[in-house]
Structures are given as C-alpha cells and as structure tokens.
Image: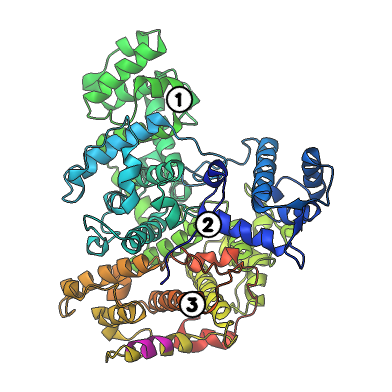
Amino acid sequence: MSSFVGVLVSDPWLQSQFTQVELRSLKSKFLSVGDNSGKVRLRDLPAVMVKLKAVSDMLTQDEIMDILNESSSDFNHDIDFESFLRAYLNLQARATAKIGDSKTSSSFLKATTTTLRHTISEPEKSSYVAHINSFLGEDPFLKKYLPLDPATNVLFDVAKDGVLLCKLINVAVPGTIDERAINTKQVLNPWERNENHTLCLNSAKAIGCTVVNIGTQDLVEARPHLVLGLISQIIKIQLLADLNLKKTPQLVELVKDSKEVEELMSLAPEKVLLKWMNFHLKKAGYKKQVTNFSSDLKDGEAYAHLLNALAPEHGTTTTLDAKDPTERANLILEQAEKLHCRRYVTSKDIVEGSPNLNLAFVAQIFQHRNGLSVDNSKLSFADMMTEDAQTSREERCFRLWINSLGIYTYVNNVFEDVRTGWVLLEVLDKTSPGSVNWKHATKPPIKMPFRKVENCNQVISIGKELNFSLVNVAGNDIVQGSKKLILAFLWQLMRFTMLQLLKNLRSHSQGKEITDGDILNWANDEVKKSGRTSVMESFKDKSLSTGIFFLQLLSAVEPRVVNWGLVTKGETDEDKKLNATYIISVARKLGCSIFLLPEDILEVNQKMILILTASIMYWSLQQNVAESDSTPTDDIESSDTSNLSIDDVAASPQFSKQANSSQLENEGLKD
C-alpha cells in the first residue's frame, strides 16, 4: 500500500484548523464546482457551502451570499482552495454565533473534536497526565517514558506512535485491544505507526468514543486538541463505567418503581451521576438541585454536603463555615483525600467550575464510596430489566455502530432511545441520504404519544422502501419497545449499509448488487488463492469458532498483518478465545470498523460473522480501488483508507436506496 499523502495547505495556521478527514472532504467539494478549466469563482460558493452541515443548519443560501459579499463585491473573481477554507471558517463561526449554545449536547461524548475549538485546557491536560502516570506507570513498554511531566507537551510526543492511546483504551475497557496486535518496537516505521493509530481509532469507536473528525494522520502529527479530546473521552468512559444497573445494581435505590427503572436505563452516565449526587444531597438536607458539573458546584456547598453524607466519620462543619470559595475548595479536597479521591481537581478547578474535571472528581467519589445499600425488594426491578447475553451483545453492537455514524443524538440504550423514532430517522438519513421527510418528523422531547408513532411509522415506511423484511411490523411496535423487532430492524439496516458500500466499490468494475453469497465466495476464494485449505461453508459454520479461517483470510488480504507465532490451533476454549481476540484487533489494525466481541466468534453468531467478513472484504476492495483509481471521489478517498469503514456511508452521495429483497433470505438472516 502506498504511503499516506495528506491534503497540504501552505498556511500552517489554516492547515491546523482542519483534520485530514475534513480537508479531503472539503477539497472534493471545492473541486466539484470548478468549470471546465478547473477555476472556481466566488459566485459558485453559496451553493456548495449551504450543503455543508456545519453551515446549513443555521444559514440560508442568501445569508451565505450576504456574508461572502462583505469580503468582496466581485462575485466573478477566482477563488483558490485556501480562500475557500477561510470562507468556510468564517461561515462556520457565524453559524455558531447565531446558534449560540442551544445545540450543545449534554453528553461528554459528543462534539469533542469540532473544528472551531482548537485550544486546550492546561488544567485538563495536567489532570489527564496524572491519570496516565497512575494507571500506566508500570506498563512494561511505557515505563521508560513515564511519569510524564504535565508542565510540558511531552504527552503529545509520546502519543505519536499510538502505543499510549491503545494502552489507555485497555485501561478504560480491559480486553478491548489484544496487546499482541500493538506494534511496540523501539522505532516504528510509518506503516507500523499508522497501524497503531488505525487500531486505536477503530477500538475507540468500539468502546463508545466519537471520532468522526479524527484521521490517523491527525494522530501521527499529535494535534493537541484532537489528542486531548480523545484522551478525555477514553478516561471518562473508564470513570463512568460502573454507572449502570448491570455493573451497579444498587443504583436501583435511586428510583421508586419499574417505570423509573426504564428511565434510569436510558439516561447518559453523567446524568445518572447527577441523579446519584442529588439523591444523597436531598437526604443530607441540601435544598438546591445540582443540574451541571460547572456553575452549580463553584461555591463548594454541594461538595461539602455530599462528602459529609458519604463519609460521616470524616464529617466537619468547618468546610461550610468557610466564607472564601478557594478556602472552602481546599477544605473539600482535604476531606476527599481521606477517601483517596482528589486526583482530578484542584481548588482552582472547583472555583472556576471546570465541567470535565468536576465530572471526573464526582465519578471518582462514586467509585470509592457510592453510599448505596442493597434493597432486595428494589433489586427485583433491576432483574426485570435484564436481558439475555445474546440480546445484550447485539444491543451493544448496534449502539456503538449508531454512535460511530456521527449523528446528533448520542445513544445510551438502544431499546429506550429509539422509541421516539427520532434516532432511527437520524440513522436512516445518514445511511440513505434523502430518504427522511423531516417536515413530517417531530424532535424529542415529545409530549404527545401519537407524534412518536408518526416518527416510527415513517421509519417503517422507509424500511419497506429499502426492501427490509417488515411483515406485520408497525411503528407502534417500536414505540412499545419490542426488543426483537428493534434488533431485527437495526440488523437489516446495518447489513444494508455494508452491502451498499461494497456495491459502490464494486461499481468501479461490475456495478452489480452484492449478496451474502458473494461475500462468502469472495472470502473462500481469497483464502484459496493464498494457498490455504480452510473453507467457510456458511456464516454459521461451527468450525469458524477456532478462528483459523479468519486469520487465514486476514493474512490473505495483507500477508504481513498476522503474526502466526501468536496463533493457537484453536483446540481448547481458551485457545479459541485467544484467537478470537487477536482476530478482532488485527482486523481493526488493518482498518475494519467492527463492533463484535470475541464471544460472537466463539459462538459463531452468523450476523456478526457476516459483518466481520464483509468488513474485511470492504477493506480489501478499497485497496484495489486505491491502486486502480488515483482520483479521489466523494464517497471513497483513495489517499487514506485506514479510517474508512461501515460508518463512512454518511459521506457517500452515491448511496443507493435499492436493496435486493431476495438477499434477506440467504442464510436466514432476515430476522
């Protein structure tokens, strides 16, 4: 594979304002409006700009024209790419100023890497460096670099080879990355470094991070705001990991009945943390409601009451008696020290209301002492809401896939969050652009139940247009939260997305529909051509549980990616699991964006096996396109395929709305 060459801009500052993913997309849009001689004029820009999401949400084409007219009255003069970028930044800033903070998501996992926010918070950097020093200080590979000095930018230098970020992901969600797949030589060549960053980004998506605006080249260059934004997400996922009923069933004490349990399950982790905090504050007699991790915590009163309630043995009135906010914050930290909970904030961070660091501080308090009891009568509510392992894994897979698409709404629980229909409409708009009639859709919060039914009816209608198997399925089934039907719909949507991506790649040669049988035959042919003898009879072939076939397939499409010295024969359950975890990490390292777990391979879950095979096929075909077609297009950027995946359908204007309904019968996968 040829080495990566990014889109270059002569002005370093201007180059720094965009990720490579953004630059490639914008360059493609810019070139698309050039005349026969390749010239682009100012008058051509409004029609292009109004289609860019960061602008289109708030500015009309006429407004864009008026803004452009402020800088030049001659709409016929030529524009170069750098002028186009400056105009785009100006319009984006105007759109942001117009919208204010009204659309800022409440979830910390949304919009952490936007183009306009390129400053970094030194207190956050220092806090995250301390976290890294604490959790990775004894790592055999990293200990020669640690501890990092928070007063310098050495963090970004160490992050350049990708090892630190991969290791941090494994701290946040143990077992996500098979560390045997990480390239840990003393000096890495560009290919090996790129592999580490590809593995990092695909694994970050697989634990719930939003990385739609980050490419591998951005991590190679260690752009501070992007690296710190990614680290922030990874650390917060670690800190908030226990804020759910599965990990901490005692959280059921926060609710009164089974209906409230359902609401609790749909809350974002940070909302659950606020609910937990207010639960204890109310019991302690604190009259105010804490609604955020910033302004509501600046005076320190809530912290003082919370710590007194959770640790009465260390309780004191001195903290509340303090009049100076900084003095009170220092006393709070002294009290937290007794609980071993003062890692993330300083007194200044509390007084200034740093939202990220306050959230981390409260999460650490929760981890050390949540103050919840085990009420057996209430725990039965939680038991009612648990689902079988297979259903739970599929919900996780679809949730992570949806969040990787970069839609506005962040999904915390698929079964609860899709019941208004809005999330599914957002996903359909990404995967099949133009299919949603937004004039007939209602955005949450929705008070009138029939509006939810209307949204879900449109979801079902679009599904039928895409030839999904939806016999006797109505919108109300989604509103009622039918898990079986929701999973069946999302499976067909994910599968349709993958097949369309494959079809678009194949269009460079045959241009025919892709079937499940084509994917099966392709995989077997690749393994056979490589001189191996393994065969996959079907996507539910029990022999696949050893992992040998997929390792041979990965080796066939890229011979250097599998280290056969690390592969077991797959004869025991333990050996099979070692192979399965290695397969997933190797596939992500190659460039496949996949969300399955080792258990899906061990149990030969035919749905996940199909997506895994199709993802490897997609990556392989991308390489063929890159070799045969040197001209980048809107839907496939041949210059860098390492971070393209099933979720890149959002960038594909050629995405077709047709799917062959007969394909749904193959392998019995329609339900």
Amino acid of disc 3 = Glu
Q: Nearer the viewer, residue 280 or 662?
A: 662
Which residue is drawn at the image coordinates 71% and 50% (left, top)?
56
Q: Is residue 441 toward the left or the right of residue 493 in the image?
A: right
Amino acid of disc 1 = Gly
Residue at image mark 1: 353
Q: Is residue 508 toward the left or the right of residue 253 in the image?
A: right
List x then y, in percent, for residue 217.
44, 55
The alpha-carbon separation of the residues under discs 1 and 3 comes to 52 Å
Which residue is drawn at the image coordinates 35% and 25% (left, top)?
306
Residue at image mark 2: 21
Identify the element where label 3 is drawn.
helix
Tag count:
3
Q: Is residue 138 toward the left or the right of residue 438 in the image?
A: left
List x then y, in percent, for residue 274.
43, 35
List x then y, in percent, for residue 116.
57, 40
Q: Is residue 413 visible?
A: yes
Reading the chain from its start, which is encountered first: label 3 or label 2? 2
Identify the element where label 1 is drawn.
loop
Residue at image mark 3: 627
Q: Is residue 538 visible?
A: no
Q: Quadrant of residue 386?
A: bottom left
Identify the element where label 2 is drawn.
helix
Image height of 392 relative to 659, above or below: above
10 Å crowding of disc 3: few (<14), some (14-19), many (20+): few
Q: Which residues are magenta?
A: 522-527
Amino acid of disc 2 = Val
Q: Is residue 402 toward the left or the right of residue 160 in the image?
A: right
The alpha-carbon separation of the residues under discs 3 and 2 comes to 20 Å
Image height of 160 relative to 292, above or below: below
